[in-house]
Image: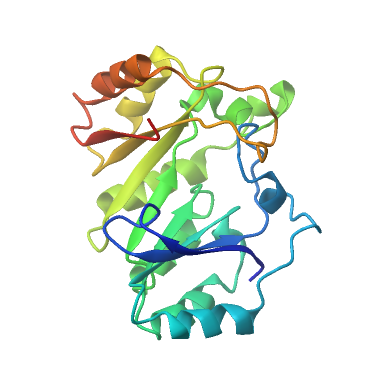
Amino acid sequence: MLILGLNKTTLLDYPNRVAATLFTGGCNFRCPYCHNKDIVRKSESITPVTDNELFSFLKKRCHVLTGVCITGGEPTLYSDLPEFIRRIKELGYLVKLDTNGTNPDMLQALIHDGLIDYCAMDIKNSPDKYGITIGLAPDQAASFDLSPIHASIQLLMTQKRIPYEFRTTIVQELHEENDMCVISEWIAGAEAYFLQSYTDSEGVLCPGFHAHDEETLRAYAALCKPLIPNVMLRGI
């Protein structure tokens, strides 16, 4: 595992838990509005967190923290993720995984083996705009294979072992009313769906994007509620 970031204490990343957040390096997407460009690109300017540093910290904080959130980048790119999580759980932590849903086989194994206790999966956009939203050129975007995304959505919605959420970062230039209607049909009946307001920062992969105003975000949430009653806003 390549760990390129460690947030030692968070009350936001793992619902109802005091947690630490680990950032794995690298991603198979290049969402232009992503705020973790150096982590996604595995920048040499970032000094990795060593195995000894990480587990020494987790051992010391096991009486303070109750959860560990593993995010990225995309954690499921790493074949040793299951063994890495086992070591964390041996210390008594609950584990939350953030994923883009492109590795449903890994996700299924993690759930089946009891290695994750909560999952948050990104829904980047409506299917027709997925390729553009993850940073593909127009000539490649149309042929993006959505089948792993579909499989991960169905897996989370049909399994009964862990709580989960879907979430979409809403960007003015990429998301509009029709997209929200299509997404709500795609994940109708989901346990929870969060609309996250885009936040500009120096770490954005491609600067120049903007957030919708609060009124628009609330309107988008209202559009989703008939099919997904548990819709909430973040970052406003």
Q: Where is residue 140 in the image (x, y as percent from the top left)?
A: 71, 28
Dividing the picture into quadrants, the one containing residue 18 is bottom left
- Determine whether, in the image, residue 194 is placed left or right of residue 189: right
Q: Where is residue 70 in the image (x, y as percent from the top left)?
A: 49, 62
Dividing the picture into quadrants, the one containing residue 162 is bottom left
Q: In this view, does 196 lie above or below 94?
A: above
Question: At x 74% / y 60%, what residue is drawn?
Answer: 46
- Determine whether, in the image, residue 205 is placed left or right of residue 18: right
- Quadrant showing the N terminus: bottom right
Q: Is residue 175 above or below residue 234?
A: above
- Determine whether, in the image, residue 49 is placed left or right of residue 233: right
Question: At x 67% / y 39%, what residue is drawn?
Answer: 30
Depth order, front residue of 81/33: 33
Question: At x 61% / y 40%, what residue is drawn?
Answer: 35
Q: Position of residue 58 (x, y in %)?
A: 47, 79
Q: Position of residue 204 (x, y in %)?
A: 65, 36
